[in-house]
Image (spheres, rainbow, N blue to C red):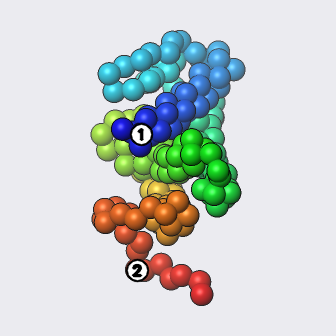
C-alpha cells in the first residue's frame, strides 16, 4: 500500500503541474474557460472551439505544460543519486515515482496518446503549423530515450529490479565503460 500511496502523490503532483500550466498559459492568452475533474483525469478547457484554433499561442498553451513536466523530470533524474540516498524515506519514495512519472508521462501523452485522443499534440501541431505526426515523432523519440534512462540509471539508483519487459535495458544502446 505504501508504494501505491507515493505513486498516487506523484501522479497528483504531475497533474497539478501539467494542468496548472495549461490554466496559467490559457489565462495569459485570455483563453481559460474552466478546470474539470473528469473520470479519466483533470482537464482545462479553452474558450475557442478546436476547429477555430490557429497560431503560435496554441503551441504555447498546449506545449508549455509538457515541456515543464519533462524538464522537471530531467532535473529530478539529474539529482537521482542525491534523492535516492536521502535519509528520509518519503523523499526517496516520492523522488523515485515523481522522476519516473515526470520523465515518461508527457512523452507518452504526446507520442502515443494522440492515437487514442487528440490532446496536447494537436494543439502543438496547430500552433506550430506542423503535422501532428511530427509532434508525435519527436515525443516518441524522447519517450524511448527517457525510458532507457529510467531502465539503465533510475531503477539502479533506487535499487529497483524488475522483470517487466517495458523496463529491460535495450541491448542496442551501448554502455560507456
Secondary structure of the residue carrying tag 1 is: helix
Q: Residue furthest front?
A: 87
As drawn, the label of residue 151 is: none
Q: Residue at x 55, y 28 (%)?
A: 16
User: 116 or 50: nearer the eye?
Assistant: 116
Q: Circles 1 and 2: CB distance less than 8 Å?
A: no
Sequence-wise first label, 1 or 2:
1
User: 141 or 127: nearer the eye?
Assistant: 141
Q: Residues within 10 Å of mark 2 (few under 14, many from 20)?
A: few
Q: Position of residue 147 (x, y in %)?
A: 46, 60
How many labels, in total? 2
Residue at mark 1: 2
Q: Residue at x 37, y 49 (%)?
A: 112
Secondary structure of the residue carrying tag 2 is: loop
Q: Does residue 135 appear anywhere in the picture?
A: no
Residue at mark 2: 171
Q: Position of residue 158 (x, y in %)?
A: 52, 60
| Res. 122 image quadrant | top left
Q: Position of residue 12 (x, y in %)?
A: 49, 30
Amino acid at each position: 500500500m505504501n508504494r501505491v500511496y507515493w505513486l498516487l502523490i506523484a501522479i497528483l503532483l504531475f497533474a497539478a503541474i501539467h494542468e496548472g500550466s495549461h490554466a496559467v498559459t490559457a489565462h495569459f492568452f485570455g483563453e481559460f474557460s474552466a478546470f474539470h475533474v473528469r473520470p479519466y483525469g483533470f482537464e482545462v478547457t479553452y474558450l475557442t472551439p478546436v476547429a477555430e484554433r490557429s497560431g503560435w499561442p496554441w503551441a504555447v498553451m498546449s506545449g508549455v505544460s509538457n515541456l515543464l513536466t519533462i524538464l522537471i523530470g530531467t532535473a529530478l533524474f539529474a539529482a537521482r543519486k542525491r534523492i535516492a540516498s536521502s535519509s528520509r524515506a518519503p523523499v526517496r519514495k516520492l523522488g523515485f515515482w515523481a522522476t519516473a512519472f515526470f520523465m515518461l508521462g508527457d512523452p507518452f501523452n504526446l507520442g502515443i496518446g494522440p492515437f487514442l485522443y487528440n490532446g496536447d499534440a494537436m494543439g502543438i501541431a496547430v500552433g506550430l503549423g506542423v503535422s501532428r505526426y511530427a509532434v508525435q515523432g519527436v515525443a516518441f523519440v524522447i519517450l524511448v530515450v527517457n525510458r532507457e534512462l529510467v531502465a539503465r540509471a533510475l531503477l539502479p539508483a533506487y535499487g529497483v529490479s524488475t522483470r517487466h519487459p517495458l523496463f529491460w535495458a535495450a541491448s542496442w544502446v551501448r554502455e560507456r565503460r
